[in-house]
Amino acid sequence: MRHAKPAESLIETMVAITVIVLATTAALSVLRTSQAGNEVIGKKVIAINLAEEGLEALRNLRDTNYLLFASDPDECWNKLEVTDVADCPTAMEITDGEAYYLTRDFDSDPVFKWHLTELTDAGTQGYLDLYSIDLNGDGNGEANMYAQSHITTVPDMSAPVENREMFQRIIGIDYPAPDYYDATATIYWYDHGVRQTLSLTRSIAHVY
């Protein structure tokens, strides 16, 4: 019966260790790639949701105008910040070719009201970060949601834009016809220093 020499046993052990190390390294590499892929997918899902939310906010603005100013829907359906139906003919309207950003009121009544504001500084406006929201005034955050950056102090705003852990939402407006406009919600964010973009377009029509 042949017995293994010490040198042969050492070589076999080294080969076995090498195979184990290579297999472990490969497994860790696959795991890291999978985690990175999940992170990318997760951010895209958030971006899609933020774009959809922006388009729903525009429908909400139109429908609120219908409810408040039903006596003159033709003049009021696409107007901004109107408080009286008599002001609709001269009020600022959602303008063709303009870029906007959305903000939401978390303090005043009615709570959660949307505001559409003309974009004048793409470097500071339209940014959204994840916040804990106190829904019932008990001092505790009952819900986490993405909201505009001025809801509280955001240290990231002082950092280079590629290092901010935030999304930016910009709304573009185009009127193919007087009775409807196409709204494009574009979401920007950074993945490992690389800027990413996602856009969704929906038509907002005067249907009253």
Image (cartoon, rainbow, N blue to C red):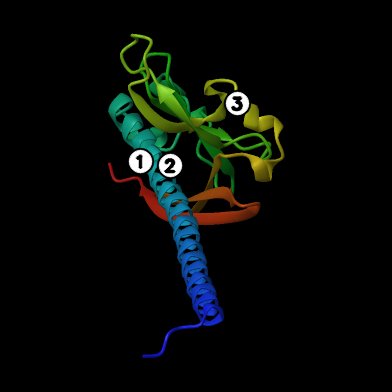
Residue drawn at x 47%, y 50% as measured from the top left = 43
According to the picture, the residue beneath numbered tag 3 turns out to be 154
Disc on the earlier residue, 1 or 3: 1
Give the amino acid at mark 3.
Answer: Val
Total label count? Answer: 3
Q: CA distance from mark 1 to mark 2?
A: 9 Å
Where does the C terminus fall, quadrant-wise?
top left
Front of the two marks 1 and 3: 3
Give the amino acid at mark 1.
Answer: Arg
Looking at the image, do the residues carrying marks 1 and 2 touch, with CB atoms under 8 Å apart? no
Q: CA distance from mark 1 to mark 3?
A: 29 Å
Residue 176 visible: no
Residue drawn at x 67%, y 46% as measured from the top left = 162
- Seen in the picture, residue 96 relative to 4 is either above or below; the reply is above
Measured from the top left, where is residue 184 in percent x and y? 48, 52
Q: Which mark is residue 59?
A: 1
